[in-house]
Image (cartoon, helix red, strand yellow):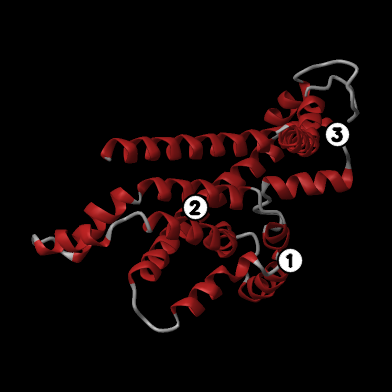
Amino acid sequence: MTGSILRLAAIRMLVILLCTAMLAPIAIVIIASFSGDGYLKFPPESFSLRWYIRFLGDPRWIASLWNSFLVAAMTCLLSTALGFLAAYAMARGAFSFRRVITALLLMPLIVPHVVTAIAMYFLSARLGLIGFRPWIAVAHSVVALPVVLVILQSALKTVDPNLERAAMIFGCSRMGVFRRVVLPLALPGLISAMLFSFLTSFDELVISIFLAGIRAETLPVRIWNSLLLEVEPTIAAVSSLLIGVTCLALIMEWAVRQTRERNATAMR
């Protein structure tokens, strides 16, 4: 009995240490972003909001932030729409090579992003699409689609096919079943997929470096270029913003999941 308690305490301590080690760099960046010093250092000798003010007052940083939001929003819509259709086809279809097609759709999770980026760059350069935001969103959708597909396949498993058959028996068309039965029941999964596809695009660096150019420089690319040229606390402020956006999306996803679980419990 005592040995089990000691092992449990040791496991908990190990988990706490691992979590602390992973979260420590994030905490350091956030603290450094409030530095009042003229250069990036930790711990800061004074605290100030000067680097957040400088970020919000710099047109180049604001333009890159806008580019990231715009590209991420287009990626979110495109990858979620395609991913939902693909997930529904895989969940309800009875065609051949279904597993092979699923494996091909999930391949971008395995292939290094730099390989995808180089391939997209050669195609984009040939077509003159470097710096074209919708095309960057298409490229980001390549790596966001597998994430969306995994989430929506899991969400569609909770949708009972008998409900769709019952709706069709009572005269509902195939499109009506899709709109009035499938979409409402899969809505929590759709929201989660949209959030994660947005984050995948918003944080994407490698593909953006190859495709953004000067016209559509995204926030991660701007951070990368600033790190190469100068290391200033503005980078810490921008990084804290990215951390905040990610945390906000995860909190929203958690709230959606809790709501779904409460609704499922209430229905039982």
Q: Residue flagged by tag 3: what amino acid is it?
A: Glu
* CB under 8 Å between discs 2 and 3: no
Query: How many badges with numbers are in the image?
Result: 3
Q: Is residue 62 above or below residue 85?
A: above
- Crowding around mark 3 (Cα neighbors within 10 Å: few <14, some 14 to 19, many 20+) is some
| Residue 112 visible at all | yes
Query: How far is the residue under mark 2 from the one under mark 1?
Result: 21 Å
Label number found at residue 221: none
* Disc 1 from disc 3: Cα separation: 27 Å
* Marks 2/3: CA–CA distance: 32 Å
At a point 50% along the width and 60% down the height, the residue shown is 150
User: Residue 74 vs residue 230: left or right?
Assistant: left
Q: Identify the secondary structure beneath mark 1.
A: helix
Q: Is residue 221 above or below residue 104?
A: above
- Is residue 26 depicted above or below 43 in this figure? below
**Viewer-closest of 113 and 159:** 159
**Can residue 129 be seen in this snapshot?**
no
Q: Quadrant of residue 32?
A: top right
- Earlier along the polypeptide chain: callout 2 or callout 3? 2
Q: Earlier in the sequence, mark 1 or mark 3?
A: 1
Report x, y in % for residue 87: 41, 64
Q: Quadrant of the N terminus?
A: top right
What's the amino acid at mark 1? Val
Residue type of the residue flagged with mark 2? Cys
In the picture of the structure, the residue carrying the numbered disc 1 is 114
Is label 3 in a helix, a strand or a loop?
Answer: loop
Give the residue at mark 3.
Answer: 232
Using a 10 Å C-alpha cutoff, classify the residue at mark 1 as few (fewer than 14 neighbours), some (14 to 19) or many (20 or more): some
